[in-house]
Image: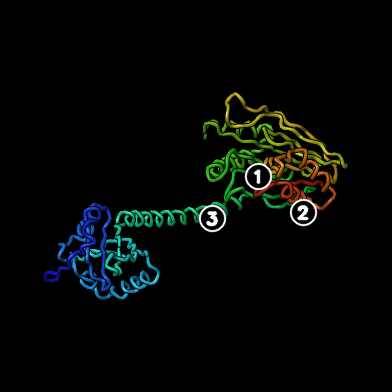
Amino acid sequence: MRGNIVQTPAWLRPMESILEDLNEGLIIVDDQLRIIFANEALIRLGRYERADVQGHTPAAIFPQEDLPYIMRQHELGQRYGRHRNEFYFPRKDGQKIPAIFSARVIQGPDGKEYGLVTITDISAQKCVEEQLRESNALLEKRQAEIDTELSLATRVQQSLAPRNLLWGNLAFETYYSPARTIGGDFSVILPEGNEFLNLAMCDVSGHGASSALLANRIYSETLHVLQEGVKPGRLLRRIHDFVLDHIGVDGFCFTMAAARFSRLGHRVTFAAAGHPPAILVSKGVVRLLASQNGILGCLADNAPAEAADGIDLVTHDRLVLYTDGLVEVFNPSHEMLGVKGLTKLVRESAAQSLEQMKRSILEGVTTWRNGPPSDDISLIIVEVR
């Protein structure tokens, strides 16, 4: 030993060249925690002179307040023969380098126990972690803003959904549920003076925010057109032309069904385009009212005709309008409920009250469906009283 320098034991010298070539910092300490060897990677990491390290204990390198922690880690290594922990390695200038300390007790040829400690610089990983934390904080903040916006959009969209209604001799039972927070279905129930009541149901392609925005725009235009007293067939044409002229999104399409009831409820004019067939239950007989036109909005030359069906109704007749979220559902065997299955549910519940009939239909669909809804659901049942 010269001065404060502890000489490397003779048994270790043949291995020095190998240990010096390691990419990670490495120290070997004796039973008094004196450093008897430190490789070049460790010297570079701490920016020390070898004399600053060789022969010294942790007390010469680490601040006094950190020594109790270091001694606890040393005791764990002694107890179990090996230990690994994350801490920091101090540079000569005081900078703290985040590092992984991996210690192992070894026995030297001289019969003494030594501690072999590798020190891995994890500054790059910590930098990435910090960047990820900052990014995650920004994402969480943005997600909170989006959640707030979606919550408001949900309340707005739910406020537009029609409510149960009694009008003249007609009773309306309604239901709406988006597959996500907001959706692309909408319905309108709008009296036209004291003589007529208009009903429109629309299903916009896609799901989520974009579909909801498009649906809300079409909703406002539908409301505007209905306030002009436009009849169902003409309504479909007007909305189709509006979408082509003012929205014009490639591949965007929608379906719509429209009905115009007389106040006494004994006459309805019905028109639909690409929409699932409405189901009419009259005197115990079930009849499907199919669309007269294909889907709307995607092709200019697919403009709907303005034809509509005039249908006479009697007391206790019920008309069921819905979107495909009620029929395009699959059971665990991958069988679709379809219009046929929904018609069966309608027929079986037609003698119940309107509210109970609605519950029975929805419960029947839920029982059939495997998993949560994948599409928006709209349902309106109209009864002549």
Is residue 192 visible in this depiction of the protein? no
Query: Could you say which disc has been placed on residue 151 in the image?
Result: 3
Q: Which residue is mark 2?
A: 355
265 shown above or below 26: above
Residue 284 x, y percent position in the rendering: 87, 42
Q: Which residue is mark 1?
A: 187
- From the image, state whether disc 1 or disc 2 is nearer to you: 2
- In the drawing, does residue 319 fall left or right of residue 118? right
9 shown above or below 294: below
Cβ atoms under marks 2 and 3 closer than 8 Å: no
Identity of the residue furthest to the left in this view: 3
Write the residue at 75% across / 52% down. Answer: 359
Marks 1 and 3 sit apart, C-alpha to C-alpha, by 20 Å
Q: The disc labelled 2 sits on which kind of residue?
A: Glu
Element type where label 1 sits in the image: strand
Element type where label 3 sits in the image: helix
Q: The disc labelled 1 sits on which kind of residue?
A: Ser
Write the residue at 69% across / 37% down. Answer: 257
Q: The disc labelled 3 sits on which kind of residue?
A: Ser
Write the residue at 50% across / 55% down. Answer: 147
